[in-house]
Amino acid sequence: MDIFYLGVLCFLFILAIFDLSVGVANDAVNFLSPAVGAKSAKFKTILLVAAIGIFVGASTSSGMMDIARHGILNPTQYAFDDVMCIFLSVAATDVILLDIFNTLGMPTSTTVSMVFGLLGGSSALAMSKILQGGVTYAELINTDKALSVIIGIFLSVAVAFVFGFIVMWLSRLIFTFNYKKHLRWSIALFGGISITSIFYFLLVSGLKGSRLLVSIGWTPQWIEANNLLILGSCLAVFTLLMEILHLFRVNIFRIIVLFGTFSLAMAFAGNDLVNFIGTPLAGLESYLDFTANGNGMSADYYKMDVLAGESHLPGKQWFLIAAGVIMTVAICTSKKAQKVVETTVNLSRQDDGEEVFSSSKIARKTVRSVLNTTSVISKYVPVSIKNWVDMRFNSEDAVLDEGVAFDQVRASVNLVLAGLLIVVGTALQLPLSTTYVAFMVAMGSSLADRAWGRETAVYRITGVITVIGGWFITAGAAFIMSFIIATLNHLGGIVSMLFVIGVLAFVLINNNRKFKKKQETETVDTLFRKLVRSHDKQEVWAMLVQHVRETQGSMIAFSRAAYRDITGGLMYENIKSLRQASNSIESQKSMWKRYRRKEILGMRKIDYLQAVEKNTWFHLGCNNCSQIIYCLKRMLEPCVEHVDNNFSPLPQNYVEEFIPICNEVDRLFDNVERMIVSGDFTGADEVLVEGNALKSRISQVRHQQQDRIQREDSNIKISLLYLNTLQETQELISMVRHLLRASKRFQS
């Protein structure tokens, strides 16, 4: 039996390695997004700074694992077998949830995942003990800790968002978007306050209780007793230093951002390390205690009193250093970390770029309410003040480099304020989540910076609501999953534990395969990103034409493939082909809405007279693309219904009649796609004539089909379906001809 528990313990450490990898990928958004969004340095440099912070934070961590040992459960009431069941369920739940969120590119809280996983697993075994009698739930579970985390969620979301909005609004009022012209009398003080805040955050949160500080006498008690002295001294020294550096033309904002990135990464590694290796280390200590002191006692009866006190695990510091190495490697190599960071950066981006979330009813109502409220308030604000504020917030003065989502001022505010709020939360003993604070500060600052315009607000609010909803889902899902897994482990014993291990391995491998496949299929619209950041109208026009060529060309390519799937599925009763067409149509419809919005933004940036000349042909082309999608959808739906219900197949004479038409349509699509993508419309008139001739030919076949319907021996259902397919094919050809004409006039 000891060998079995040793195997479970080894698997816990394997899960810990996965947990460290997926955990740092998820929490990377806390400390990477400001520097990445503002491009304060090269991405490799930012990663290096963060990696050093992570390694130092993990290596100097105090290693307090109380939350995993006795923060939720009362270990004196649980046997060795019980805690191993719980720790396995927590580790499995944590890895699965974090991996799912990373795959989706959504940030979530590792603290919530672990705490509610512990609560769920402990509750599962607590129910069993309560049914046996003699003990109450309050004696088994520390419910105060779980309640404090729930309160922390609400506080983190609301407080961070509000303070992010206020501080960013004041900062922008001082510096404006053309901040390089307003640095002489403010940058030294701003830099001094910022570096002091980050340094104090480092002392209180990142290095709290570390051996490095304790060795020089800076214990947590000494720091708390000398707060004012430390703050005053640091403010004076750092303000003077910032002024000197500014005189030597050093970018102070870049120093703030990189130092803030290092500090948040270090604090994350030092404090959140327990979320990743707390349970395996607690499991190791439990195993060592059981094997040393069990004296042949059954694992079902040996109580875990060893977990009630402080940890005395030998070689604990080496485990922390090893964890730091794993986290450092993970942050430098994880593709999922970059995707999570990209979600936050996209939602706080200054320009109108690509929106990854759609609109929602809640977002629309929120935007409408805010607009109505600001309209009322605006009536009571003097015009002179409104004009002055608008002048300070004139985003036209902002010059963002290629690939920059927002400027250095906002990146500095995000990092400094996130650190300050975590320090305040620590001082007030409030369980603020670093993920929640960092994310909501970024959202509040982007709102204050007027990055959420009327054209983008509904999409970004939907994104924020989606992320926040994911946080609450994390808590519920962690509790339920851990409860179920712990129950299975407890009732099924060795067999259930082996089953859980197998399922977990399958889920992790499957999720990573799906993520890699998704990464291969996803394309980044780099052309559009260059377009929105360009201020040269001729350059914008050239890129817009190229973008329209690519999107309209891809629309024709999609239509060609979808039409082939639909007609082939109907003629040969291939339901798989029809369902494939259905999926591609829905995907294309969603993609086309984004493309259309992007290109309208591009039309706004070209010369006004040129826009007046090209607008008609641009919108005609857009409408034709939309109509092509709807035409294919109208053709598809009755075909799916017919084939899926196993109705009579298309008669052979219909098939033989229809195949040449399908071939001609395919050839037409090929010619039109080639002309639109290349921009060479030589022979376009001939293609239009051929298309018109094909329409006439289909008209003749339609009339023949109408005559067939009049006959008594014909199958009405199949005849009407074939007639509908011919009609929609004719309509599709019309739309493609109109698109070719519009594209030719637009590009010429």
Image (spheres, grey):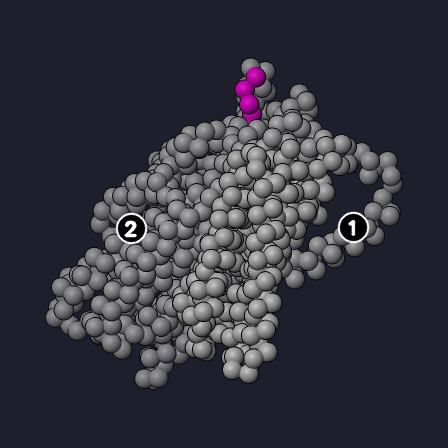
Under mark 1, the amino acid is: Thr
User: Where residue 263 sits in the image (x, y, percent)?
Assistant: 46, 37
Residue placed at 65% from the left, 62% from the top? 361
Q: Which range is magenta? A: 249-253
- SS under mark 1: helix
Label 1 close to label 2 by CB (< 8 Å): no
Name the outermost residue toward the top: 248
Under mark 2, the amino acid is: Ile
User: Where residue 629 sits in the image (x, y, percent)?
Assistant: 57, 56
Name the main secondary structure of what is drawn in magenta. Answer: loop
User: Where residue 128 sits in the image (x, y, percent)?
Assistant: 33, 79
Q: Which mark is residue 15?
A: none
The residue labelled by disc 2 is 17
User: Where residue 149 sits in the image (x, y, percent)?
Assistant: 49, 60
The residue labelled by disc 1 is 374
- Res. 155 visible in picture: no
Choose between 576 and 733: the one closer to the eye: 733
* Rendering quarter of residue 687: top right
- Res. 9 visible in picture: yes
* Rendering quarter of residue 479: bottom left
Q: Quadrant of the N terminus?
A: bottom left
- 414, above or below 284, in the image: above
- 597, above or below 572, in the image: above
Mark 1 → mark 2, Cα distance in angstroms? 50 Å
